[in-house]
Amino acid sequence: MLTGRLPFPGKSSAEIFRSLLGDPPTPPSQLNPEIPAELERIVLEALEKDRELRIQSAAEIKASLLRLRRDTSTSQLAAPSPAAAGQSAAISRRKLWIGVAAVLAVIATVWLGKGILVPSPSDTSGHSEESSDTSAMAGDTPSIAVLPFVDMSPEGDQEYFSDGLAEELLNALAKNRGLKVAGRTSSFSFKGKDDDLRVIGAKLNVTSILEGSVRKAGDQVRITVQLINVADGFHLWSESYDRQLKDIFAVQKEIASAVAGALQVTLLGARGTAAAEVDPEAYSAYLQGKFFLERLNEGDLQRAVALIERARNLEPSYAPAWASLARVRFRQADYGDLPRTEGNAQARQAAKRAIELDPNLAEAYTALGFIKMVYDWDWEGADAAIQQALDLGPGSAKAIENAANLAATLGRFDKALALGRRAVALDPLSADAYRALGLSAFYSGRLEEAEKAFRKALELNPQRVWHHVRVGWVLLEQGRLQEALQEMEQSNFRLLRNFGLALTYHAMGRQEEANAALTELVEEGEGLLDFQIASVYAYRDEVDLAFQWLNRAYETRDAGLASALGYPYFRKLHDDPRWEAFLKKMKLDG
């Protein structure tokens, strides 16, 4: 505030950390010659690298500044240089004391516990211009993104632990209804990048960013955490934690509590399985497996299976590993790696085991709700589980995605669209969030919004097998047939590519090619893509075959049937009495 620049500048958190650890601060008087020696001494004591010599508290720095203001006249503090005279010297003195007053105001705000981002509940007298600007950026709810922590260990071997710290903190903060927390996928997309924090804040639509570092040496580890105001890049709060490696997981709760206190956030309920009890190797395997499960490019499912099973075997009482195992088992069944009935039974058991181990784990209820929706077709049970997930983790984008999917399943398309938009707002760099929004928009006939959402999902994860096909759906509905064909041809999963080509070639009147694509789809996709085969026959107006394959999809518990109400390719079946009978069998006629 006194010099107009940060003491340790840098384009990225890594550069800033290096400067903090190794570079001496530039004396303030070199940047602003009006700063007197005594004030410079206070600033440098606050920036002292030796923690024993550094100013120890905000109260201490406040007392030093007040004492300086009392003991020294304004004229003595800011005597003009020979080059300065008259009005310019007076302006310099005023600017200097405005800076000191600003420092005192910030210290008073923090020291008195009023908070910077979150107004006191009892304060109904209004806000300053600064707080009004913050509200304009992110609405009335304070907002934060937790970035992946930087591994600064000499060996560079603490990456997954660094990610885990950030993820645990993100999950803890997301439980609070008074705080908007950017989703994991969006926050972690900046891992390893040097983006300016203001750019990151704008992309994630948050007012503050929490970042940190991990430095391990021998059996000691130092964790540094800092909260930064996006608007100006100033540090609002920071802390360091020095621990032995055997206590490393316990510090997660301590960090979460400290940050929550700085933001005046009250965490809801218990954090679940004590992180201090988790085997480090199991925890690392869990984090890696979850990464591959979120990405799901070619070969990622197999990697996720091996890693999450390893985490579960090493630490059988770790509830998050069981919740992720539930998602893995469903995917294995959906991709044909496990028999559908067996895979979903194991998924359900894993989700219930996670809940037994930790009844407060939102992720476990999210997994259970998903299985009840797409395999059990238990709409009431799915709704109850998803609602429980939202109660435990109101900021969970994944739970909100599931709520959007369930609303679309039940034909509540306006609600589904609103929830899809909310999921994107919470996790704006998540391909899955845009997929959920795109489906809701597509089913409700909002084709422009659907196209934008599907294209964004494709941009965020170009290798995901469904994304090109979904963009092609929209283009097909809009009559942009050549563009649709180009999208369908780019799908990297042959069965889905044939599904898209069978639809598009038929629309283009290229019947021989349409028949060839459908024949391959039927020969290789039976038992795996029965729902898609039924939709192609319906699109071709071959109604009897469409119902035949719909019934096969019902018998094989095809997950696609959860979207039957909104699926546009079944429109030609809606006037057939067998359609109402089928919906009744699915309990979707209410």
Image (spheres, rainbow, N blue to C red):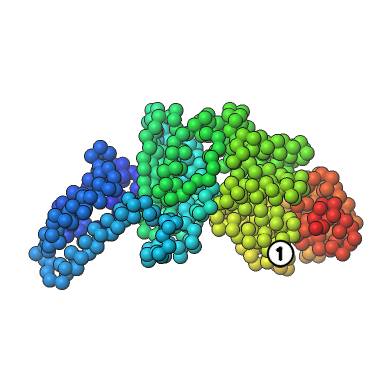
Relative vertical location of residue 309 with respect to residue 369 in this rendering, above or below: above
Q: Residues within 10 Å of mark 1 (few under 14, many from 20)?
A: many
The quadrant of the rendering that contains the C terminus is: bottom right
Name the residue: 74% across, 39% down: 344
Name the residue: 29% across, 48% down: 58
| Residue 478 percent across, percent down from the top left | 71, 68
Name the residue: 58% across, 33% down: 318
Residue with the most extreme bottom position: 87
- Is residue 36 visible in the rendered image? The answer is no
Q: Is residue 562 left or right of residue 58?
A: right
Q: Is residue 510 left or right of residue 402?
A: right
- Is residue 584 visible in the rendered image? The answer is yes
| Residue 108 percent across, percent down from the top left | 31, 54
Residue at numbered disc 1: 444
Relative vertical location of residue 446 with respect to residue 427 in this rendering, above or below: below
Of the pair 4 and 196, the residue shown nearer to us? 4
Q: For the image shown, how many numbered marks are present on the structure?
A: 1
Name the residue: 71% across, 39% down: 348
Of the pair 255 and 510, the residue shown nearer to us? 255
Of the pair 252 and 333, the residue shown nearer to us? 252
Secondary structure, mark 1, is: loop
The quadrant of the rendering that contains the N terminus is: bottom left
| Residue 452 percent across, percent down from the top left | 61, 63
Q: Amino acid at mark 1?
A: Ser
| Residue 392 percent across, percent down from the top left | 59, 46
Relative vertical location of residue 216 with respect to residue 170 in this rendering, above or below: above
Residue with the most extreme front position: 122
Of the pair 155 and 85, the residue shown nearer to us? 85
Q: Is residue 4 left or right of residue 518?
A: left
